[in-house]
Amino acid sequence: MSLNQEKHQFPHHVVIVGGGFAGLEAAKQLGKAPVKVTLVDKRNFHLFQPLLYQVATGSLSPGDIASPLRGVVAEQKNTHVIMGEVVDVDPEQKKLILRDQELDYDTLVLATGVSHNYFGNDWSEKAPGLKTVEDALEMRRRIFASFEAAEKEPDSEKRKALLTFAIIGAGPTGVELAGALAELAHTKLKEEYRSINTTEAQIHLIQSGERILPSFKPALSEKARIELEKLGVTVMTKTRVTNIENDIVTVSSGETTKDIPAHTILWGAGVKASAVSEAISNRTGAELDRAGRVFVNEDLTIPGHPDIFVIGDLANFSHQGDSPVPGVAPAAMQEGVYVAKLIRKRLKGQTLKPFHYIDYGSLAVIGRHQAVVQYKAIRFSGPLAWFSWLFIHIYYMIEFDNQLIVMIQWAWSYFTGQGGARLITEKATKTPTYEECQARYTPLVTSESSVEA
């Protein structure tokens, strides 16, 4: 029986695209509702993105921060998980077009998130961002490969470049990466190499704006800068990257231009909405902001299409305060809960008040024992902020197994100073076809005489 045939046995078919914080929360909240739920994602797992930087720096393994979607919703008998990629939407026919099939829907919830934004520059291969497991593994490969290459490099200038890391963008991702890299070089690795002194590693954090962590209050931004510099990070504000070429980052600050030889260049400067937003805009006339996010109504629907919700990082909700709701996990989860509740209300012929985001504050970790926390008028930093960051992140993880694993890993790292998964893996390549394998195959035994010999 096809999904579309199954649909007609239920009063309402909700299709949710995206298994991130927003989409998965909506699916979980509809687990006991009288609806058929289909959860679609390109991957078969939910990823706890806030901890990706710890995978990139070897403190955690990918499996520690990922949960299989089917496992998360296994007890929801009304929920079907499909691994697929959306290519288009037909609002008139109420069809979601995947690369290999079509799905009918009564209500569509789009939560496909965002990807890296290089602002028109072709820098994706030169400076990987940090949004997926593959991104984190590529970062990890480059970081640790640089230390290994420096260990056997006799030329001092080349060795210096190998031990220079440039991080572009000083939002929470950039700051956390810089802090983790500094701790890695200055503490965890310093006794493991014989030909190099890892504490000589240079980490440049480059920010075009006036201060790092621009979403935080100036006092906390300054505190974060001071702590990063104590760790050995060179913080460069009011500095714009103009070119990346041949392991050299060219930056400009005012009238001054400078080249920074850096073998490892990492990106954390901006995001843009997934390609689904363009399809939605073309099909519905929905307006997009500069980052490609969809402007939504007060109930998170698209104007003129009450049966299509856009939530999470893909949505621009600008009906509360002077700026859009931030693209953070708590906001995405609140939107998922709201949409699920509104769908249940609609089935009863009722409605809800407009969505209202409750701001639970902002956190950013700088290093061991150092973080900054901002909640309304409450702002603090230091060890208490670090422990707050630690437990809040564990609280938001999806499965208990992951919470326990991460707690053990962090405890081990905290008391021993040792990382957890400092593996250098090969860059992903295309799987060879059967014919290619056959062409490469050379028999070990080529004749009967060789067997007898």
Image (spheres, helix red, strand yellow):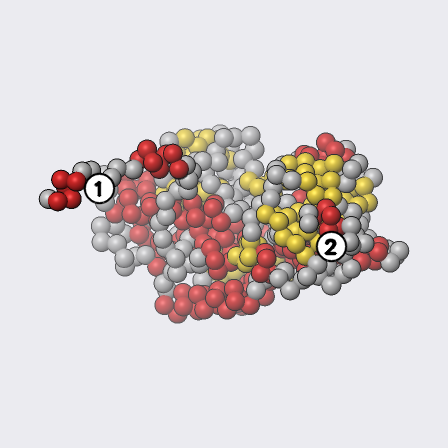
Q: Which residue is mark 2?
A: 36
**Residue 70 left/right relative to 5:** left
- 21 vs 34, nearest the viewer: 34
Is residue 260 left or right of 155 when viewed as pictured? Answer: right
Residue depicted at x 30% and y 57%: 190
Q: Amino acid at mark 1?
A: Leu
Q: How many marks?
A: 2
Residue under the image location 17 percent in, 40 percent down: 448
Q: State the residue in front, 104 or 415.
A: 104
Residue 45, horizontal then vertical, whole percent: 55, 53
Percent across and percent down for residue 77 are: 68, 61
Eyeballing the image, is 292 above or below 353?
A: above
**Whole-percent x, y for residue 304 in the image:** 83, 39
Position above or below: 415 against 287: below
Crowding near pointer 1: few (<14 within 10 Å), some, many (20+)? few
Under circle 2, the secondary element is strand
Q: Which residue is mark 1?
A: 444
Mark 1 or mark 2, which has the lower sequence index?
Answer: 2
The residue most toward the left is: 453
* Location of residue 154 (image quadrant): top left
* Dot in front, 1 or 2: 1
Work out whether 402 lies above or below 429: below
Residue under the image location 20 percent in, 38 percent down: 446
Q: Quadrant of residue 315?
A: top right
Residue drawn at (28%, 44%) of the image: 149
Q: For the residue labelled by badge 1, is the local secondary structure a helix, a strand or a loop?
A: loop
Q: Is residue 408 left or right of residue 101?
A: left
Q: Which amino acid type is shown beneath numbered disc 2?
A: Lys
The answer to whether residue 26 shows anywhere in this view is yes
